[in-house]
């Protein structure tokens, strides 16, 4: 758990940076395993998903505990998670990387979107994926999967540390998702990473322009030549970046 609260300034910065830039900056700080493995956007979105983690942990289902009738229970953890994930947060599900059954469907994910949540991530499957893809809210999963979660998963714990796609996710961590996938930023590093990555994205835009104009990579990326640093400074003044 963390007392960190994601500021609107940091959220706005992270909306503009790539997961690749975040991965590089976390690697510089010794963190190598923050990219959620095996998940992809249900449908690409123009804007990044940015929000703090609110978690749901599934364990393997046991037949005597998971008949269809359990969904009638007002305290069913899957339903409670959907109704209590705070606006602006991302619901992150630990399905043990087992996508043979769904961890949510379009009705529950639509409810998250209507409640103002920032996104949903599962290392398992989603059913009704086409409907989920039509929502403005970003969603990531391993693949579409029609069987109900009860066939393989039992929703058990809400807002506890989980694993998702081989990454440790703690409640309050900051998730950033783009078309490549999802990065998990430890909460205490979120403001710093947002600030540094904003400058990194600016530099990479400059580098891409130079490469498109025929410039060689050596001495440019990384920038080891003073002439290229001067070019970059001039470019920033010209573009207001």
Image (tube, rainbow, N blue to C red):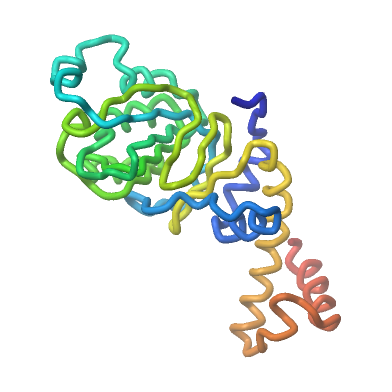
Q: Is residue 221 left or right of residue 185?
A: right
Q: Residue at x 45, y 49 (%)?
A: 36
User: Which quadrant would the N terminus be assigned to in this image?
Assistant: top right
- Viewer-closest of 142 and 225: 142
Q: Residue furthest top?
A: 74
Judged left or right of residue 240, residue 208 is left
In this rendered view, identify the residue nearer to me: 85 or 137.
85
Is 142 on the left or on the right of 198, as rendered? left
The quadrant where residue 6 appears: top right
x then y, percent, for residue 180: 45, 58
- Residue 212 point in image, percent of width and height: 59, 83
**Depth check: 192 or 64 in front?**
64
Q: Give the x, y percent position of residue 148.
A: 17, 32
Please determine whether, in this image, residue 135 is positioned above or below residue 158: below
Q: Residue at 69% across / 77% down in the picture?
A: 221
The quadrant of the image that shows the C terminus is bottom right
Q: Is residue 43 left or right of residue 227?
A: left
In the displayed structure, would residue 45 be above or below residue 148? below
Image quadrant assignment for residue 30: bottom right
Identity of the residue drawn at 69% across and 62% down: 200
């Amino acid at each position: 758990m963390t007392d960190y609260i994601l500021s609107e300034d940091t959220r706005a910065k992270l909306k503009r940076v790539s997961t690749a830039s975040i991965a590089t900056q976390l690697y510089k700080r010794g963190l190598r395993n923050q990219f959620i493995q095996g998940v992809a956007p249900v449908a690409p979105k123009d804007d990044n998903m940015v929000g703090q983690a609110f978690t749901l942990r599934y364990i393997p289902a046991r037949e005597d505990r998971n008949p269809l009738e359990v969904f009638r229970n007002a305290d069913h953890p899957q339903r409670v998670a959907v109704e209590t994930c705070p606006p602006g947060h991302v619901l992150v599900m630990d399905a043990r990387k087992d996508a043979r059954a769904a961890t949510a469907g379009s009705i529950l994910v639509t409810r998250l979107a209507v409640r103002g949540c920032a996104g949903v991530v599962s290392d398992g499957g989603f059913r009704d994926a086409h409907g989920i893809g039509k929502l403005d809210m970003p969603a990531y999963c391993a693949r579409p999967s029609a069987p109900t979660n009860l066939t393989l998963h039992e929703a058990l714990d809400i807002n506890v540390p989980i694993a998702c796609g081989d990454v440790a996710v703690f409640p309050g961590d900051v998730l950033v998702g783009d078309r490549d996938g999802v990065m998990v930023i430890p909460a205490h590093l979120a403001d710093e990473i947002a600030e540094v990555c904003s400058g990194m994205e600016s530099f990479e835009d400059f580098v891409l322009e130079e490469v498109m104009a025929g410039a060689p990579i050596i001495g440019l990326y990384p920038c080891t030549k003073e002439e290229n640093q001067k070019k970059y400074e001039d470019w920033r003044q010209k573009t207001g970046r």
